[in-house]
Amino acid sequence: MKTFLFAALCAAPLAHAHITIAPASAPAGAYQTIVFKVGHGCDGSATTGITVLLPDGVTAKPMPKPGWTINLVEGKLATPLQIHGKTITSAVREIAWRGGPLPDAYYDEFTLQAKLPDLPARYVFKVGQQCEKGRTDWSDVDPASKTPAPVLEVMPAAMPPHHH
């Protein structure tokens, strides 16, 4: 039993060595800092790019990262959004960081600020990881997959306190 437990603990970091998202959950309608954590390259090859596809209902802007350039791709929104009293029909749909390289032996984070939808749900952020040799698409909605997409659970917003 101890051997099995030890083996499971040793394997645990490998199971989480994908591109992950933090926090894992956030309140509906919030402005939220979201961090994409890159735990490894592609089969030992250094990472040279990360591309994040924003799910419908999420708008965002990236944080600059020294040694990396940023490319934004705008597109039409499936459903217009109301932000600060304005109707938004198009917004950034894809954010790409290029640069590095980030060696396979190191870990790094890529950050953006997002305006989350008012509707609680699971929002899937498909991520493409480009490497010096090869690429990995973290786009599978099955969390048990070898290439699961990062998912943000948008929770109902907290009710304001009731005052008498």
Image (cartoon, rainbow, N blue to C red):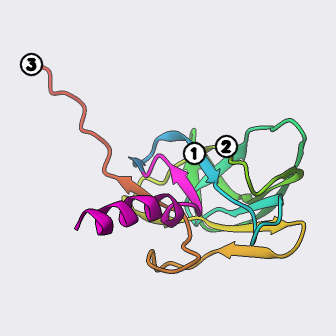
Assign the C terminus to one quadrant of the image. top left
Residue 164 is marked as: 3
Depth check: give the residue in front, 8 or 65. 8
What crowding class fits label 3: few (fewer than 14 Cα within 10 Å), some (14-19), or many (20 or more)?
A: few
Label 1 belongs to which residue? 34
In the rendered structure, are the residues bearing label 3 and label 1 in contact, judged by CB atoms less than 8 Å apart? no
What crowding class fits label 2: few (fewer than 14 Cα within 10 Å), some (14-19), or many (20 or more)?
A: some
First in residue order: circle 2 vs circle 1: 1
Q: Left or right of 81: which side holds 42?
A: right
- Examine the rendered structure and indicate whether residue 34 appears above or below residue 126: above
How many numbered callouts? Answer: 3
Depth check: give the residue in front, 25 or 121. 25
Could you tell me which residue is drawn at 72 percent across and 74 percent down? Answer: 136
Label 2 belongs to which residue? 111
**In the image, which residues are magenta?**
1-24
Which amino acid does the dot numbered 3 rest on?
His
Assign the N terminus to one quadrant of the image. bottom left
- Examine the rendered structure and indicate whether residue 76 appears above or below residue 120: below
Could you tell me which residue is drawn at 68 percent across and 48 percent down? Answer: 107
